[in-house]
């Protein structure tokens, strides 16, 4: 029995969450759900987007499923990453059949440092303009690189690539690169290399199959993961994980999509795949593969899918079809 925090949030977040909980019922895993509030709607009622009670609930569970927030997303998700020290942002770049992925058979992951770099928010105006500080610490670099190698080992991936710009950012990325190679000494069985971020951006488009696990700093990881999302087609399909020492928070990359909200037109795949990532995190790998395969069958059939995938079905119809495959 796993204790799971469930935060549906706003807009389509609620709909894709309902769809995902529906398919999870068909798995051979028991969950005890703790529902919690966050987002615009909750803020309208109470004045706060992320109540302390929600943070406490998440801290008291093993993992959290998060739908989406609206305009308050920064106050909710960014704050949650900080409060829970979710220092890893894990984004798979995986192509599925029946989608408009630009490549077939793509399967790599981006491990993005989630707590520092240029996103630490140390900006100031100067007489000439403005300055932003980029903070790279030994501690954060070491733990993100270690996570990447451990992840590769655990998931049977053969190579970790550090992405940086150490030729220009000699001190900050110089340090990141140095720590990467130092951590790598503990993983002699895993292949490794390092690349400049600009070249990496090009290789994503020309030869994306060269990557297996990428580890990088915050801003580069943010940009490359959106480029990765573009490679495998559409926000309705892309899951993510935020992972710390004690918790994991799993969420689709998309937001509350107000244009789709309340219409039953949202694609539940990104949220379902976020649940697949949660199952892997909980080491329920067999159940994770079962769920992923059921979704792949539905995508492959292409019959009971949402409009963004060229179908006519609603969010819940697609979820019921995934569940039917699971129960077959
Ligand atoms: P969005 O991801 O909500 O939607 C952008 C467009 O992508 C939609 O109009 C829709 O065409 C498509 N789309 C997204 N998810 C889809 C799905 N599951 N099925 C079918 N189509 C889908 O991003 P947008 O419009 O920039 O932001 C809307 C709201 O969401 C904003 O208030 C923003 O702050 C918030 N947001 C929240 C995030 C979070 O909670 N983590 C992340 C991104 C945005
Ligand atoms: Mg982003």
Image: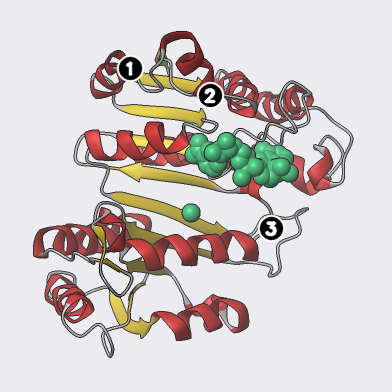
Residue that numbered label 1 is attached to? 51
Residue projecting furthest to the front: 127
Residue that numbered label 3 is attached to? 233
Instruction: From this view, report whether residue 39 is shown above or below residue 228.
Output: above
Residue 249, quarter of picture: top left
Q: In whole angstroms, how far apart are the C-alphas of marks 2 and 3?
A: 27 Å
- Tell me if mark 1 has few (under 14), some (14-19) or many (20+) residues whose alpha carbon lies within 10 angstroms of its own: some
Instruction: From this view, report whether residue 284 is shown above or below residue 215.
Output: above
Residue nearer the viewer, 110 or 196: 196
Q: Is residue 223 visible in this depiction of the protein?
A: yes
Instruction: From this view, report whether residue 327 is shown above or below residue 44.
Output: below
* Mark 1 residue element: loop
Q: Position of residue 276 (x, y in %)?
A: 50, 38
Q: Position of residue 136 (x, y in %)?
A: 18, 66
Q: In whole angstroms, how far apart are the C-alphas of marks 1 and 2?
A: 31 Å
Residue projecting furthest to the bottom: 167
* Mark 2 residue element: loop
Q: Residue at x 70, y 30 (%)?
A: 322
Sequence order check: which comes first, mark 2 or mark 3? 2
Sequence order check: which comes first, mark 1 or mark 3? 1
Q: Position of residue 260 (x, y in %)?
A: 74, 31
Q: Is mark 1 within 8 Å of ligand 1?
A: no
Residue nearer the viewer, 9 or 179: 9
- Tell me if mark 2 has few (under 14), some (14-19) or many (20+) residues whose alpha carbon lies within 10 angstroms of its own: some
Residue that numbered label 2 is attached to? 27
């Amino acid at each position: 029995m796993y204790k799971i925090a469930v935060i549906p949030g706003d807009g389509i977040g609620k709909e894709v969450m309902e769809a995902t909980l529906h398919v999870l019922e068909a798995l051979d895993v028991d969950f005890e759900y703790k529902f919690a509030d966050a987002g615009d709607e909750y803020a309208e009622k109470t004045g706060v987007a992320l109540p302390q009670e929600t943070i406490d609930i998440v801290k008291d569970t093993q993992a959290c499923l998060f739908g989406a927030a609206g305009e308050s997303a920064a106050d909710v998700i960014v704050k949650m990453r900080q409060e829970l020290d979710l220092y890893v942002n894990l984004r798979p770049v995986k192509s599925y059949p029946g989608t408009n992925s630009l490549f077939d058979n793509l399967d790599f992951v981006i491990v993005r440092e989630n707590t520092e770099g240029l996103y630490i928010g140390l900006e100031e105006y100067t007489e000439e303009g403005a300055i932003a500080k980029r903070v790279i610490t030994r501690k954060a670099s070491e733990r993100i690189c270690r996570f990447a190698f451990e992840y590769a080992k655990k998931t049977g991936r053969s190579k970790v690539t550090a992405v940086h710009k150490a030729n220009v950012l000699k001190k900050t990325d110089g340090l990141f690169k140095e720590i990467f190679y130092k951590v790598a000494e503990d993983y002699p069985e895993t292949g490794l290399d390092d690349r400049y971020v600009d070249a990496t951006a090009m290789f994503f488009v020309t030869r994306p199959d060269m990557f297996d696990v990428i580890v990088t700093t915050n801003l580069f990881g943010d940009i490359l993961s959106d480029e990765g999302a573009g490679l495998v087609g559409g926000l309705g399909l892309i899951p993510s994980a935020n992972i710390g020492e004690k918790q994991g928070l799993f969420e689709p990359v998309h937001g509350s999509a107000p244009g789709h909200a309340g219409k039953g037109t949202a694609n539940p795949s990104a949220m379902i795949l976020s649940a697949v990532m949660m199952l892997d995190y909980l080491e329920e790998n067999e159940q994770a593969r079962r769920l992923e395969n059921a979704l792949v069958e539905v995508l492959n059939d292409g019959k009971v899918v949402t409009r963004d995938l060229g179908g006519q079905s609603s969010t819940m119809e697609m979820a019921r079809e995934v569940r039917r495959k699971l129960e077959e």
